[in-house]
Image: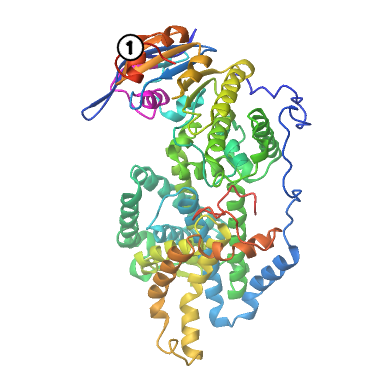
Amino acid sequence: MTDLAPPPVADPGDERVGGPAAEPVVPAAAPARPARPRVVPLALILTAFLSLPLVVSATYLNVVSRAAIYGIVAISLNVLVGYAGQVSLGHAAFLGLGAFSSGYALSEMGLPFPGALLTAVLVSMGIALVLGGVALRVTGLYLALVTIAFGLFAQETLFNIRSLTGGGAGQPAPRPDLFAGDVAYAYLCIAVLALVIAFDWRLTATKAGRAIQALRDDERVAASWGIDVTGYKLLAFVISGGIAGLGGALFASVEQIVAKDDFPFSLSLTFLLMTVVGGTGNRWGVVQGGLLFAALPTLLDQLHANVHVFPFTSITATWEPAIGAVLLLLTLMMFPGGMAQQQGALLRWLGGGPFAHDPEPSGPAQGGGMGARP
Amino acid sequence: MPVLETDGVSIRFGGVQALSNVSLRIDEGEIVGILGPNGAGKTTLFNCVSGFYQPTEGRIRLFDEDVTDQKPEARAQRGLGRTFQQVGLVRSFTVLENLIVAQHASVRSSSVSAVLGLGAARREERELRRRADRVLDFMGLGDVRDRPIAGLPYGTLKMVEVAAVLATDPSILMLDEPLAGASAEEGSAFCDRVEQMRRELGLTIILIEHHVPLVLRTSDYVYVLNFGSLLAEGPPEEIRGNQAVAEAYMGEGATALA
């Protein structure tokens, strides 16, 4: 098989100089200026976000850490739901696997913190590989059921193995000395979130990332282009599990103790909700969804305590599931692309484009693209 | 030398015998037309050859190798490219992005080095883009390069799909009704393009198309399917005068096709 021959006129080694004369290239309507991100507004937003651990009161520092971790989990679910088009209703289990692995590595094996993070990632990837191997034989509703079963099994059985998880007492997961303080630990979580976002951005520009997104749109087309559909679905599962495990390791050391009740089924549901509300397929959207849902109970409590107007007088943090459900319904009915779609114009403007909505919205996976946009 | 053979391929769906005992032999560099009325089993035959259906009986050989039990992606990696009746493209990508994913099997550098942005991986990414551009130029699609798939007219999508399959660097190209919805003029231009693909890219081409005169004009050899069986085969001039074929298309009493 030879390489595809170049068109008759163009020189093979050269950039296409002028195509065959018979086919005049229609010039683009506007000269394509390479889009430069608007640095100043982006820097302002970033600074505001990065100064959070310094400005919030000490009581809420762990909420900031947890928000960053939810952002990591959102990226993890986005790989599976947004890119591969598969569903997981058991993602809290991967968070738990990461958390208990890290706790075990820290307290029982005496590994340093980076070693514990690595252990958490590897264990979660390993379990994801096994679960994916089983679960990906089924699709849709059945896949959802299998992942629920896995989540319940992890919570009720796996996390009850006393020698591994400390049983009811929980597994201690001390912070590293350098990040022992709440402020420092919040920054560590934010730094890891940044790394995970960078990884996700690079992933979408690789062979594997592209293959995963192609099979989401149409498995038959992907296969006809030589893409190993089952293999790449499994890879998406493993990458997603690994990232969630990393989030879990960080999660373990927020309160510095892990208990099995930290990972109920409702948490898996919250994770899926925040991904959808954030905007499936869009990394900035899902991260914001994660931040929002992590902060939601605290926000509700704050509103309840400080705003003495109906409805805030009756709404407390216990209303969080209901609020989440309402947000989900509003998203599905009005903005299937989630927060990313609502902010479409803003995100476009920040990326260097005009402040305008997408003239041709392409549905829920909008902005998934191939990740030319960081 | 045959590059593709089907040997007595049959397939049943429940009570329906969709294909019975279909044997084809396609030589390197041939343009082969497959004709037949709606429901004759043309697309089913494509699905068996490309691996999406498992024939109940019969074998399929690709480059002298039995691929009957291989998955579609394995056959694609051996150089079998195909288009779909419903446009087979990644809808959330742009045209260029589609042509880049389509080159999947030829990417050598690992995804790990690509994630890290290592030099070799970056060079390869640039090469993928250049090849995509070359294919788009070949198909005369340069001006839709950066357009999203959603929003392009149907006829253009069919051509983008062909371009994407060309980007997979196939040896055999199976086209399933590439001209659905095209005008007579576009049809004629496409036939020239098919001829050009064989000449310049050295492809073997199998063409399903409803437009009988175009198929007869373009093909070296034609197979006619009816109710899942081979009704006739031969060079176009023989098929044109074949009474059984004419009857299958136009009803009893018809004597000549086209």
Q: Is residue A295 magenta?
A: no
The answer to whether residue B8 shows anywhere in this view is no
Rendered position, A34 above or below B160: below
Which is nearer the eye, B30 or B225? B225
Describe residue A154's horizontal placement relative to residue A290 as left or right. left
User: For the view shown, which residue lies furthest in the front direction?
Assistant: B253
Find the magenta span and give its range: B41-60
Rendered position, A54 above or below B143: below
Rendered position, A246 above or below B157: below
- For disc 1, the marked residue is B244
Describe residue A360's horizontal placement relative to residue B59 as left or right. right
**Residue B51 in which image quadrant:** top left
Rendered position, A27 above or below A11: below
How far across and down, in percent of the image, does residue A255 sit?
A: 48, 72
User: For the view shown, which residue lies furthest in the left direction?
Assistant: B15
Q: Amino acid at mark 1?
A: Ala
Give the residue at x 47% y 91%. Answer: A309
Q: Secondary structure at mark 1?
A: helix
Which is nearer the eye, B243 or A351? B243
How far across and down, in percent of the image, does residue B99 sit?
A: 59, 36
Quarter placement of the C terminus of chain A: bottom right
Give the residue at x 44% y 43%. Answer: A233
Quarter placement of the N terminus of chain A: top right
Give the residue at x 48% y 89%. Answer: A305
Describe residue A7's horizontal placement relative to residue A282 as left or right. right
How far across and down, in percent of the image, does residue B56 sit?
A: 28, 22
Which is nearer the eye, B201 or A126? B201
Q: Chain of mark 1?
A: B
How far across and down, in percent of the image, does residue A213 sit?
A: 51, 45
Q: Is residue B44 magenta?
A: yes
